[in-house]
Amino acid sequence: MFDDDFDDDEDWGSIEDSLMKYEEVKKGNSTSILGEEEFESVIEHFLQESNEAEALLACDIAGTYYPFSSTILLLKAEILTQAQKYGQALIALDQVEQYDSKNIDAVLLRSDIMLAQLKFDRAAMWLEEQTANFTGREKVEILLELSDVYDESEEFEAVFDTLVRVIKIDKRNEEALQKLCFWAEFNGRLEESIALHVQLTDDDPYNSLAWFNLGAGYQGLKMYEKCIDAYEYCIAIDEKFEFAYRNMADAYMRMKLYDKALECLGRHLEIAKPEDVIFEAMGYCWEKRKDFIRARHFYRQALQLNPQDDTIFYKIGETYAREKQWEQAAKSFSSALNLDKENAAYCMAIGNCLMEMDVKSEALVCYLNAVRLKPGSKTTWVALIRGLFLTGYHEEAIIQLEVARDHCGDKGEFSYYHAASLFELGKVKEAMLHLEKGLKDAPKKIKVFTSLNPEYMLRSTVAELIGKYKKK
């Protein structure tokens, strides 16, 4: 510890000495000349102090002593680039390349300047030309920069192709492998990605990122068993590869293997920082297993990490609704609505709870709000019209059906509600016409009609008409 402290003091003393000598050089009083490295440290000191003007002056003074120093010239080019003096920066880079034609930093800085000037094609062409002048790690660096240029210019296919070129040079390049996973899916080139990563895993079977990307490719194609196999290899190599557990859990959930998904999510919690999405996924799995108490436990864990997530409150409400705990469900749905006051689904959910609690007038207000928020949605209109029917407002239901048709068109369900309302009003002939229209337009949705009042089926004319369409 003491040695480190001593080194820090020594470094500070060194820069202090260099700054004093630099001031003497500026005044023209110095009998000693700063070394090239001393000038570099002085320039970098001024940059750290955000004194770009003095740093640039130091570069110019250093240039009079060391006119062929590519390091000094590169520092000058960097300062000019930060100041958006691109023309002067390019002149300095020309000088760097004159003395050091294979300076990778100069190559990348020139590309950055072109990007800042929105000259994407020129930047790409420049970097592509430079790939011929470099090998190994430096060539990889240029190709990664080139992939970023293609990203900026929205040439997304070229991004993928360039990253593949990186992998052919460096099979374990972490940045390229991580980006390939995204761009393969983005460009719809999952089959190519799978072929590439199959070859990678054959050549380098302990490459955990390659196994992960292979799994992601299979997952994108919904080949869940194969993707799980790939993820298993990934975590066998690196048991703390958290995204493999996350993706594997997702695959198991899509296969409806919720126990397996919970195992993966539990393992993720052991090795990674708790996240709301993980707790939410665990809640979902328990909900699918109909263990609503545990589902709510994990949903609430998610809320502790993200208390402004209205969708979690809604999911908690759904678990209460499935247990017919209507009051608790309504409270959770109301919490969701408080966070997202423009959500029609939340209004309908509260309305449904209030209907079950026999608070029908308030339920109708909720349904009206849902219709106001989403007037073009058939679902909101059906909720309102059903609510009006069940509350006994049959004439109003018919009026609202006409408004619903204006907004959504003539849907089969509307005919069934229209028929039922007319039956309740004693208008049998007109009701039969709407019933037949519903049977013609949406015969598979007849339960909409029969669930409103099962006694309709006791009418011989109704039973015969429905039977007629069932035979078709």
Image: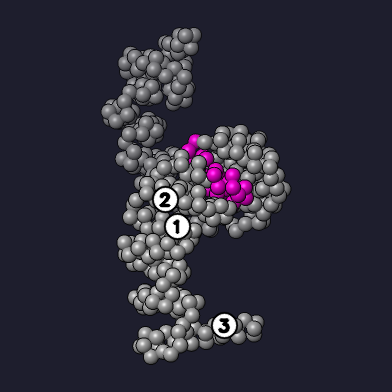
Q: Secondary structure at mark 3?
A: helix
Residue at left 37%, top 54%?
Answer: 115
Write down the residue under mark 2: 126
Q: Hey, which quadrant is residue 406 in on the image?
A: top left
How far apart are the two marked residues, 3 and 2, measured between alpha carbons? Answer: 41 Å
Residue stretch rendered in magenta on the structure: 164-188
Total marks shown come to 3
In this rendered view, identify the residue nearer to me: 416 or 237. Answer: 237
Categorize mark 2 by other alpha carbons within 10 Å: few (<14), some (14-19), many (20+): some
CB under 8 Å between callouts 2 and 1? yes
Residue at left 43%, top 90%?
Answer: 31
Tell me the amino acid under the disc marked 1.
Answer: Val
Q: Earlier in the sequence, mark 2 or mark 1?
A: 1
In this rendered view, identify the residue nearer to me: 426 or 151. Answer: 151
Tell me the amino acid under the disc marked 2.
Answer: Trp
Tell me the quadrant of the picture where the N terminus can be found: bottom right
Q: Earlier in the sequence, mark 3 or mark 2?
A: 3
